[in-house]
Amino acid sequence: MKIFDAFHNSSAGIALLRWTLGILLLLHGIAKVTGGVGFIEGMLGKMGLPGFIAYGVYIGEVVAPILLLINRFVVPAALVIAVNMVFALVLVHTGDFFQLTQTGGWKLELQAFFLVSALVVALTAPKTGGK
């Protein structure tokens, strides 16, 4: 139907996904900026990893989302977010992979959204010089 043709706009769809990912993840980053990363440092220490790695969350949850929002270095930023989400899944959510919420949703649906959206943004970003 012709009415649905108006909604076919791949560029707008990709931009909407990029902005949604950037805004939602940046809110998590702001919480890390105001609350610190001690929680993450402790988990890394339990795994035998150096605590300074925790500061990488600022890159994955503040810098990378800002880059998505300003449409700069989109592919590297999206890939940083994907790596950040893999760390989050391994450090915090390994016991949740086969868990459901009380309402029947997958316990990791938010983390899955962030990870898959970051991969989709990286895979669909237009090829442009310097961006």
Image: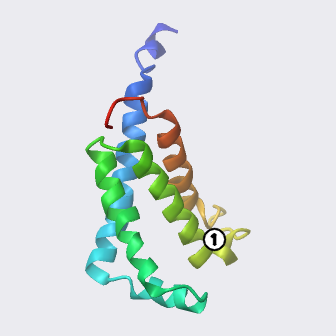
- Position in image of residue 99 (x %, y %): 70, 71
The amino acid pointed to by label 1 is: Gln
- For this rendering, which residue is in front, 128 or 88? 128
| Residue drawn where x is 74% and y is 68% of the image | 98
Count of residue discs:
1
Residue at the outermost top position: 2
Q: x, y percentage for residue 36?
A: 32, 83
Quadrant location of residue 91?
bottom right
Q: Nearer the viewer, residue 103 or 77?
A: 77
**Which element carries disc 1, helix, strand or loop?**
loop
Q: Could you classify mark 1 by the number of other residues whose Cα lies within 10 Å: few (under 14), some (14-19), or many (20 or more)?
A: few
Q: Horizontal and vertical percent for residue 41?
A: 45, 86
Question: In front here: 4 or 25?
Answer: 25
Give the answer, above or below, for where 40 lies relative to 79.
below
Residue 8 image-quadrant placement:
top left
Could you tell me which residue is drawn at 62 percent across and 67 percent down?
107
Q: Nearer the viewer, residue 99 or 53?
A: 53
Q: Is residue 131 above or below residue 128?
A: below
Please indicate whether residue 131 sits to the left or right of residue 3 in the image: left
Q: Where's residue 75, x and y in %?
A: 44, 43
Kindly identify the residue that appears in the image at 30 percent across and 50 percent down.
67
Q: Residue at x 42, y 82 (%)?
A: 52
Q: Label 1: which residue?
A: 102
Quadrant in which the C terminus is drawn: top left
